[in-house]
């Protein structure tokens, strides 16, 4: 099985926007309505894709995807938020990815 991080390193997420996220069983679906960047051979952002849905399969050692990750909201202080809160936020506002390159 190919390492997910090697595969994801072909795409740039810097300056993209998550427009929705959902979880079911052992799967996390993240939508980017404006697309993500394809990286060239030098790791530079080349082209923006069409709208894309990133589907991550969670290792089956977890009972469900809800128990396998956490979302942190950064600002003046760090606090943990529930997935349901994040999903409500995404209904009104896309989540801008600024600090993560790939």
Image: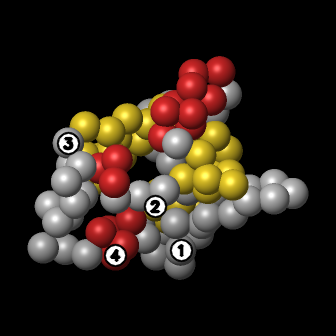
Q: Nearer the viewer, mark 2 or mark 3?
A: 3
Q: Which residue is drawn at 53% across and 60% down?
A: 12
Q: Residue at x 19, y 74 (%)?
A: 2
Q: Residue at x 65, y 21 (%)?
A: 92
Secondary structure under the numbered disc 2 in the rendered image? strand
Secondary structure under the numbered disc 1 in the rendered image? loop
> How many numbered marks appear?
4
Disc 2 from disc 3: Cα separation: 26 Å
> What residue is pinned by disc 4?
6
Secondary structure under the numbered disc 4 in the rendered image? helix
In the rendered image, residue 34, in percent from the top left (x then y), is placed at: 55, 34
> What residue is pinned by disc 1?
43
Disc 1 from disc 4: Cα separation: 13 Å
In the rendered image, residue 35, in percent from the top left (x then y), is placed at: 50, 40
Q: Residue at x 41, y 41 (%)?
A: 30
Q: N-terminal of the two: label 2 or label 1? A: 2
Q: Residues within 10 Å of mark 2 (few under 14, many from 20)?
A: many
Q: Nearer the viewer, mark 4 or mark 3?
A: 3
Disc 2 from disc 1: Cα separation: 9 Å
Q: Residues within 10 Å of mark 3 (few under 14, many from 20)?
A: few
Q: Which mark is residue 11?
A: 2
> What residue is pinned by disc 3?
25
Residue farthest to the top, as pictured: 92
Disc 4 from disc 2: Cα separation: 10 Å
| Front position in the image: 16 or 58 | 58
């Amino acid at each position: 099985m190919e390492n997910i991080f090697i595969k994801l390193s072909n795409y740039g997420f810097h300056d993209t926007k998550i427009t929705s996220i959902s979880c079911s069983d052992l799967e996390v679906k993240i939508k980017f309505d404006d697309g993500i960047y394809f990286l060239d051979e030098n790791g530079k952002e080349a082209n923006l894709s069409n709208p894309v849905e990133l589907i991550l399969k969670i290792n089956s050692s977890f009972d469900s995807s809800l128990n396998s990750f956490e979302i942190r909201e950064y600002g003046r202080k760090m606090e943990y938020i529930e997935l349901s809160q994040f999903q409500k936020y995404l209904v009104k506002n896309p989540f801008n990815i600024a600090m993560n390159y790939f």
